[in-house]
Image (spheres, rainbow, N blue to C red):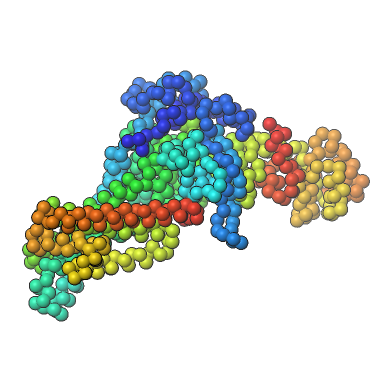
């Protein structure tokens, strides 16, 4: 518990940057074990033919003080992964270590430093006031509430809840309830916090405020935050690093900048009614095809064509008799990266993308 | 209270000073210093004045009991509603009985009042625990009690204690009204009544935990388990003299003892040791059994991944 206070001294900003530069690979210069270390985690639900592999051999490290996003569509395994890390779901195989403590063995020790805001849950008592909730859950989280009263005040201040501190949660608006839920999770001073779809159901303004608060809390309190969402905006705004999940597997794991930067890779999107399968195959022999969109009208192909390659591409298009309707450079967002990584273009970019950037 | 403590060796900065530093929290001077977070890690003074201290079981007990107290006083309608409904049922029972049985009822009215008192206690303890678990599952707060560094058992036990205390308060009101309305006189030696009635309903508390556990696994069945409370009538009036084995059922033995306490004025220390031992054994046995069922059910729910499905 002393940890949240102490790590704030360490300058979490600084840590974020080193994390970003380092990626997930070199934890050695970190003092002590990482905030979260997942090894070969597998969880299957159901039996026989109906069995669904929710998490499939996932390994993941989250360094202290970083903000990591878990991105993936519904059913990708984000929530199961989080619940396994919390010990709420027991995995079939693999291990989860929180600050070096195995969640399975040293359950109680691990629990002192981790908390979560799970999707769709209230997480707090609506019949108690905001402050009563913070005090209650701080105690449940293993902290004497009197010793963190000032911290709670600060938390309420930051989340703009100070004047609602003595209001029962049930009387608050939805956005505020969500913030109380977040505050109650942070009240116990957990060092590692999982937030499952934290902006779900919030209006645009509330979601924006919450994102800003998350970013600030992470920096000022030195928290390690794992945010799961299918909302790219949230992830892009809040996280240093993104882990993309699809069908229970990690399909990408890198910094936001690296993923976006690598995906950009001077790609151009060419749209033309003449882009039939044969033409695309012809292009594929000479260029790196990043994406093919046959559904678009007219069909489009995204080609990695930086520098002089662009001239070669236009030559090739002319030679193939392709009349270009539209050509533009691609400014990718995480959504594009995600589509790319989850099979729209199988292995076109592959794992190499992350490597190139670092 | 190691359960609430955090391992001191896990400080993230791992600075030599921070790990050994006692979390005294009584350094007010540092509190004014802004936690800028962009300073180099000096490691020798807290960025904030509120250095957290680990919570002890005392804090835990205070938090859990205080929450129950707050909800009890802030939402008195629930308690009053329960009292009114119980009294209404008793009135129907009493007046209907008078019409049907006349003098026979008048002769056994003491036994009925005592039995009814115990029934309201049992129903209160059972349903508050099982409904509470059901609600906490819905609210997503149950997991937070399971993933506490204290472990779920002390939290559950404290909640159980709070429910029993609360139930005693409301049932005492019901008892008083029943006595006044029927003009019955009973022996109300407080220590004896509280100990015997209390131990009697601890067994029901165990059933409540078991039912709560089943609710975690099979959410729909949970509601049906509420019907079990009508079965308590049978347990309270179990023929423990004709069928001695029924004494090991929840409530039955305690009910017989409570009749002797309140009707015959027997005091706690006047009971044979074997009776008292059986009362304690039944209470502890069912509480432990119920808790194990709960533990098993939540363990299974964790494997099935249904814990925390909303």
Q: Please name whichever residue, A169 or B106, is drawn nearer the observer in this view of the structure.
A: B106
Q: Is residue A149 left or right of residue B44?
A: left
Residue A221 in picture, x, y percent from top left: 47, 31
Q: Residue furthest bottom?
A: B100
Q: Is residue A250 left or right of residue B99?
A: right
Q: Is residue B238 left or right of residue B105?
A: right
Q: Residue at x 37, y 64 (%)?
A: B223
Q: Residue at x 8, y 66 (%)?
A: B184
**Residue A54 makes an appearance in the image:** yes
Residue A267 in picture, x, y percent from top left: 77, 40
Q: Please name whichever residue, A112 or B51, is drawn nearer the observer in this view of the structure.
A: A112
Q: Relative to A284, does residue B175 appear above or below in the rendering? A: below
Residue B295 in picture, x, y percent from top left: 39, 52
Q: Please name whichever residue, B238 or A207, is drawn nearer the observer in this view of the structure.
A: B238
Q: Quadrant of the N terminus of chain A?
A: top left
The number of numbered badges drawn on the structure is: 0
Residue A358 in picture, x, y percent from top left: 68, 31
Q: Residue at x 59, y 53 (%)?
A: A53
Q: Residue at x 21, y 66 (%)?
A: B244
Q: Relative to A135, does residue B243 appear above or below in the rendering? A: below
Q: Residue furthest right?
A: A319
Say which quarter of the image contains residue B18: top left
């Amino acid at each position: 518990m002393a940890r949240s206070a102490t790590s704030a001294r360490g300058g979490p900003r600084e840590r974020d940057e080193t994390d970003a530069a380092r990626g997930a690979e070199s934890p050695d210069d970190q003092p002590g074990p990482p905030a979260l270390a997942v090894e070969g985690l597998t969880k299957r639900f159901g039996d026989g033919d109906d069995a669904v592999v929710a998490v499939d051999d996932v390994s993941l490290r989250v360094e202290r003080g970083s903000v990591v996003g878990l991105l993936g569509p519904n059913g990708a395994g984000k929530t199961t992964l989080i619940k396994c890390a919390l010990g709420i779901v027991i995995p079939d195989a693999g291990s989860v270590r929180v600050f070096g403590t195995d969640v399975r063995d040293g359950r109680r020790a691990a629990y002192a430093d981790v908390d979560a805001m799970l999707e769709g849950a209230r997480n707090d008592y609506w019949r108690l006031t905001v402050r009563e909730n913070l005090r209650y859950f701080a105690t449940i989280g293993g902290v004497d509430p009197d010793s963190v009263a000032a911290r709670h005040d600060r938390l309420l201040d930051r989340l703009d809840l100070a004047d609602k501190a003595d209001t029962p949660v049930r009387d608050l608006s939805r956005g505020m309830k969500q913030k109380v839920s977040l505050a109650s999770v942070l009240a116990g001073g957990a060092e590692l916090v999982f937030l499952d779809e934290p902006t779900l159901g919030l209006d645009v303004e509330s979601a924006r405020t919450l994102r800003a608060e998350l970013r600030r809390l992470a920096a000022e309190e030195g928290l390690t935050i794992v945010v799961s969402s299918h909302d790219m905006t949230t992830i892009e705004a809040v996280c240093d690093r993104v882990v993309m999940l699809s069908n229970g597997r990690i399909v990408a794991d890198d910094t936001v900048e690296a993923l976006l930067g690598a995906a950009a890779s001077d790609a151009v999107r060419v749209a033309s009614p003449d882009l039939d399968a044969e033409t695309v195959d012809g292009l594929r022999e000479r260029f790196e095809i990043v994406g093919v969109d046959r559904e678009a009208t007219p069909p489009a192909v995204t080609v990695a064509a930086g520098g002089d390659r662009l001239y070669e591409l236009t030559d090739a298009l002319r030679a193939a008799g392709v009349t270009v309707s539209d050509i533009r450079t691609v400014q990718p967002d995480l959504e594009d990266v995600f589509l790319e990584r989850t099979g729209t273009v199988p292995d076109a970019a592959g794992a190499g993308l992350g490597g190139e950037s670092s | 209270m190691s359960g609430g403590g955090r391992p001191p060796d896990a400080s993230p900065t791992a600075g030599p000073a921070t790990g050994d530093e006692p979390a005294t929290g009584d350094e007010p001077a540092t509190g004014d210093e802004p936690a800028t977070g962009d300073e180099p890690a000096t490691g020798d003074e807290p960025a904030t004045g509120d250095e957290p201290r680990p919570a002890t079981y005392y804090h835990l007990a205070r938090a859990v009991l205080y929450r129950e107290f707050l909800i009890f006083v802030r939402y008195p309608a629930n308690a009053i509603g329960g009292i009114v409904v119980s009294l209404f049922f008793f009135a129907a029972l009493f007046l209907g009985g008078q019409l049907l049985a006349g003098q026979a009822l008048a002769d056994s009215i003491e036994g009925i009042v005592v039995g009814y008192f115990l029934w309201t206690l049992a129903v209160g303890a059972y349903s508050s625990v099982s409904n509470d678990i059901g609600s906490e599952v819905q609210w997503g707060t149950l997991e937070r009690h399971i993933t506490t560094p204290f472990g779920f058992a002390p939290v559950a036990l404290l909640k159980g204690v709070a429910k029993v205390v609360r139930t005693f308060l409301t049932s005492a009101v019901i008892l008083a009204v029943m006595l006044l309305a029927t003009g019955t006189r009973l022996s109300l030696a407080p220590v004896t009544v509280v100990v015997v009635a209390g131990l009697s309903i601890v067994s029901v508390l165990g059933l409540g935990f078991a039912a709560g556990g089943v609710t975690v696994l099979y959410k729909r069945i949970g509601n049906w388990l509420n019907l079990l409370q009508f079965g308590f009538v049978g347990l309270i009036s179990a023929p423990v003299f004709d069928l001695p084995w029924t004494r090991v059922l929840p409530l039955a033995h305690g009910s017989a003892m409570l009749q002797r306490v309140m009707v015959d004025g027997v005091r706690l220390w006047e009971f044979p040791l074997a009776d008292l031992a059986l009362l304690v054994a039944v209470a502890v046995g069912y509480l432990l059994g119920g808790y194990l069922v709960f533990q098993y059910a939540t363990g299974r729910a964790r494997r099935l991944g249904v814990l925390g499905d909303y």
